[in-house]
Amino acid sequence: MAASYGPHDLGRDCFAWLVGEGGWGESNSGLVRGSGESLLVDTLIDLTQTRQMLEGIATLVEDHPIRTVVNTHADGDHWFGNELVAGPGVEIIASESAAASMTAAVAAELASLWAREDRVGDFVRSVAGSFDPTGVTATAPTRTFSGELDLDVGGRHVRLVQVGPAHTAGDVVVHVPDAKVVYTGDILFIGGAPLVWDGPLSRCIAACDLLLDLDVTTVVPGHGPVTGKEGVARVRDYLVYVEQEATRRFEAGLDLAEAIASIDLSGFPEMSEHERIAANVTNVYEQLDPAMPRAGRLEQFDLMASVHLCARTAGPADGTPA
């Protein structure tokens, strides 16, 4: 299924709202309808995008109002639109670990990236310049959990499973057993390279294994087109490869910059956003060297911005696809 903009009917009253090709900031949402109510999986990066999504699904929820929102994790492109669905009779759910980062301070820090006059700002504007997260009112979850949570959505069983720390500290996947559908949040990027902020990578690989073990036929990633288990397996292949290659370089004594620059990603030509290798390799090095200071988001963005700039300047000759 192509990642064309708008709603996609997955069957059995499950839907996906897909945004563009799934690049930076182009996150997906999901909708699960039960008898007389609906569950929304994630809101979007800014109020304009979220309003467009809510307008686009208005007929789907006319007789099935949204009573539950699940934020799969704490990245702003999956919860910054919460204020537009919050209110009496609406429960917003996230893992405890995710909720800890869903604050006004974190939202303001992320929104400030667009205005930075440095390499990070240039990078963010170049990959996500059409979005505007300024003016968002941080609207936190009203219910949190750890581990697993079973929900009744108008008589339908919906299962929430915390798989973080992985992509972030508190990732959750949303499984709809009777439809054989799972919404994965950013455990999966389809079409773009996976990104591991918190990790370790082994936890992301374990999350992929969990998805592969589920009785599902339809997989809605956090970014990119709807896929099946073949998409999950491909993401797993990338993560295993990067973990192995980064470990080899660490053991050979290469520094972080050398490791990032020397990993050949030509085996994954279908993936874009290859600058994410910088964050992923950093994560592996941090796990292998506990004394290494953990990079914050700003530092991770700066590392990726550097790789992005080098790729645009040098092209694919260095083994890293542009």
Image (cartoon, grey):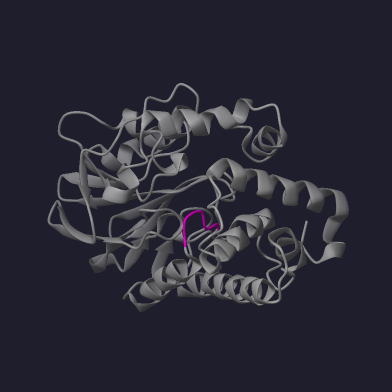
Main secondary structure of the magenta stretch: loop
**Which residue occupies the extreme top position in the image?**
135
Answer whether residue 191 is visible to the viewer in this image.
no
Measured as percent of width and height from the top left, residue 13 is found at 28, 55
Where is residue 270? Give x, y as percent: 67, 65
Residue located farthest toward the front when viewing the structure as drawn: 291
The region drawn magenta spans 195-199
Left-right relation of 316 to 177:
right
Among the 4 quarters of the image, the one containing residue 14:
bottom left
Q: Residue at x 21, y 28 (%)?
A: 87
Residue drawn at x 79%, y 53% as measured from the top left: 311
Residue that appears at 37% across and 55% down: 171
Q: Position of residue 6 (x, y in %)?
A: 48, 44
Residue 139 in the magenta stretch? The answer is no
Residue 112, placed above or below residue 95: above
Residue 144's x, y, as percent? 22, 47
Residue sitting nearer the eye, 21 or 274: 274
* Quadrant showing the C terminus: bottom right
- For image coordinates 66% across by 43% down, the residue present is 302
- Picture layout, residue 49 above or below residue 16: above
Up/down of 65 relative to 180, above or below: above
Please say whether residue 93 is visible from this viewpoint.
yes
Query: Residue 277 sits in which quadrant?
Result: bottom right
Examine the image and state in which quarter residue 130 appears: top right
Labels in figure, total: 0
Name the foreground residue: 158 vs 18.
158
198 to the left or right of 70: right
